[in-house]
Amino acid sequence: MITLYGVAISNYYNKIKLALLEKNIPFSEELLAPGQSEAVLSRSPLGKIPFIKTPDGYLSESQAILEYLEDAFPETPLYPADAYQRGKCREFIQHIELNVELIARRLYGEVLFGGKASQETKDEVLAKVETGLTGLARLMTLSPYALGEQFSVADVVAWPHLQLVSFACQQIYGRDLVAEHIPGIAEYIQLIESRPHAQTVSTDRAAALEAFFSKK
Ligand SMILES: N[C@@H](CCC(=O)N[C@@H](CS)C(=O)NCC(=O)O)C(=O)O
C-alpha cells in the first residue's frame, strides 16, 4: 500500500495523485504541509511535498515517484511501450518542468502566499515563460492528448502544471500566456477533466484551495 503525503493545492502532489488513480494503485493520502522539521526532512530531503511511503521506504521528487510507480505497478502503464515514444514523454516532462513550471514558480509567492515579486522578476519570468511555452507548443500535439492519441504520463504532468501556470500568469500579467502560446489548450483541459479520476483530483484541489484562501 502506498501513502501519498502533501497538500491538494500542490500541482506536483496532484500529478502523483492522478497517476495513482489512473494506474488503479491502492493508496491513502496523508495531509502534510512542506516544512523544515526533522520529521519531514527525514522523509523528503528538502522538506518538499509530495513524497510517498512505499513498502520499502520513503521516496520524494515527483518524477522519481512517477517512474517508481510505473516500474512497481506495470499492469496499467502510463508510458507508451515504444522506447522512442517513452523518450518523447520524458523529453516533454523535462521541458514542461524545467522551462515552464519552474520558471512560473517564481510568481507563486505573490499569487498564493501573500509575497511580492519584484518588477525585475516579473519581467524576467515573462520572457522565460514565453520562451518555454513556445517550445512546449512545438512538442505538444493535442491530438487529442498531449502527445498523441493515447492518454499518457505526459497528460498526468501537463494537466496540473499548465493550469497553475495559466492561473499565475493571469494573476500577474492579466494575460493567459498558456492559452496564447498553446491554442486549443482549453479544449484539452476539458478533455482531461472528462476523466473521472481527473475530476476527483480537481474536486479535491478546489476544496483545498477554498480552505486555503478562506484562511488568508
Ligand atoms: N521537484 C519537486 C518539486 C516539488 C515542489 O516544489 N513542491 C512544493 C509544493 S508544490 C513544495 O514542497 N514547496 C515547499 C518548498 O519548496 O520548500 C518535485 O517534483 O516533487
Image (spheres, rainbow, N blue to C red):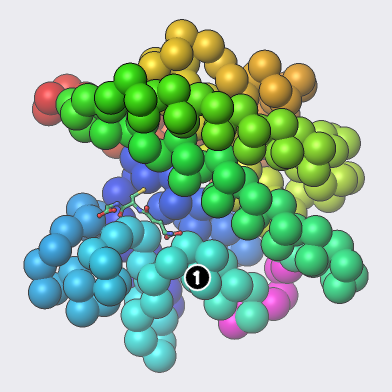
Q: Nearer the viewer, residue 94 or 19?
A: 94
The quarter holding residue 88 reads: bottom right
Is 84 contained in the magenta span? no
Would you place residue 34 above or below residue 145 in this image? below
- Region rendered in magenta: 72-77
- Residue for point 76% across, 21% down: 184
Q: Position of residue 164 (x, y in %)?
A: 47, 32
Is 73 contained in the magenta span? yes
Q: Position of residue 80 (x, y in %)?
A: 82, 64
User: Which residue type does callout 1 highlight?
Assistant: Ile
The quarter holding residue 57 reads: bottom left
Residue tagged by mark 1? 65
Q: Nearer the viewer, residue 116 or 73?
A: 116
- Residue for point 55% across, 27% down: 127
Q: Nearer the viewer, residue 50 or 112?
A: 112
* Residue 198 seen in render: no
Q: Nearer the viewer, residue 86 or 19?
A: 86
- Ligand 1 within 8 Å of the CB at mark 1: yes
Please give left or right for residue 181 compared with residue 28 in the image: right
Q: Position of residue 198 (x, y in %)?
A: 57, 41
Where does the N terminus fall, quadrant-wise?
A: bottom left
- Residue for point 39% across, 71% down: 60
Q: Position of residue 190 (x, y in %)?
A: 66, 26
Would you place residue 180 above or below residue 164 in this image? above
Please give left or right for residue 104 compared with residue 110 in the image: right
- Residue for point 71% across, 39% down: 136
